[in-house]
Image: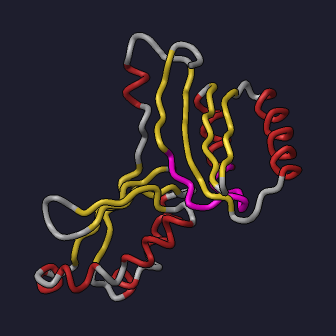
């Protein structure tokens, strides 16, 4: 589940010294990003604060994750949580694009020898074929780039599984788009 978390200061006196405070959360947000909970983050354009795009199991788990931030613990900031449903608009369109293409990059958590990579490829091909997913997996100097194509639910399920796979870290979605046919 993707959740937009919009930060706000609990009192004006904190907002007046925003730059002094916000730096305390930065290393924690960075760690949450490395673990895959924070997909992206921005500075607010309308006032001091941050906006986080979270990937969690539920709203409750998002709240627990945000409670790890020092400024939330000290009740200096709070977050308004907005659950996202990115595909609502697609249901209203007259023509449905059937295939989803998702591209991500990641860093290997440890060394990958030839046999390990072949095993990953063999297992992936077998499992992906069963759910109608095709694509490309590239590995170079400790980094992966993968393109996944197929029906939306299986592709998103696989991507979620990949995000939780301990063989990866620093996973970042590059793009996601729909098409009428496989690219």
| Closer to the camera in the image, 61 or 156 | 156
Q: Is residue 64 visible?
A: no
Above or below residue 178? Residue 35 is below
- Measuring from the top left, give residue 45's x and y in whole percent: 16, 58
- Measuring from the top left, give residue 150's x and y in whole percent: 63, 25
* Residue at the image point whose x is 45% and y is 58% from the top: 54
Above or below residue 105? Residue 103 is above
Above or below residue 122? Residue 160 is below
- Measuring from the top left, give residue 39's x and y in whole percent: 46, 56
Query: Magenta stretch containing residue 40, yes or no?
Result: no
| Quadrant in the rendering for residue 75 | bottom left
* Residue at the image point whose x is 52% and y is 62% from the top: 37
Query: Magenta stretch containing residue 166, yes or no?
Result: yes
Please give the range of residues in magenta: 162-173
* Residue at the image point whose x is 55% and y is 27% from the top: 100
* Residue at the image point whose x is 75% and y is 28% from the top: 131
| Quadrant in the rendering for residue 63 | bottom left
| Closer to the camera in the image, 3 or 28 | 28
- Measuring from the top left, give residue 33's x and y in whole percent: 49, 64
Q: Is residue 24 visible?
A: yes
């Amino acid at each position: 589940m993707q959740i937009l978390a919009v930060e706000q200061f609990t009192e004006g006196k904190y907002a007046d010294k925003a730059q002094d405070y916000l730096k305390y959360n930065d290393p924690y947000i960075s760690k949450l990003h490395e673990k895959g909970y924070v997909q992206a983050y921005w500075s607010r354009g309308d006032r001091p604060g941050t906006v986080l795009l979270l990937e969690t199991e539920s709203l409750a788990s998002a709240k627990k994750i945000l409670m790890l931030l020092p400024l939330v613990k000290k009740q200096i900031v709070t977050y308004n949580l907005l659950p996202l449903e990115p595909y609502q608009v697609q249901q209203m369109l007259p023509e449905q694009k059937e295939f989803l293409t998702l591209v991500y990059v990641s860093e290997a958590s440890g060394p990958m020898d030839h046999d390990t990579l072949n095993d990953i490829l063999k297992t992936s091909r077998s499992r992906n074929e069963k759910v109608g997913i095709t694509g490309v997996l590239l590995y170079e100097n400790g980094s992966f780039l993968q393109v996944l194509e197929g029906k939306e639910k299986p592709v998103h399920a696989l991507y979620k599984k990949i995000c939780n796979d301990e063989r990866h870290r620093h996973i970042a979605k590059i793009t996601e788009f729909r098409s009428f046919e496989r690219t």
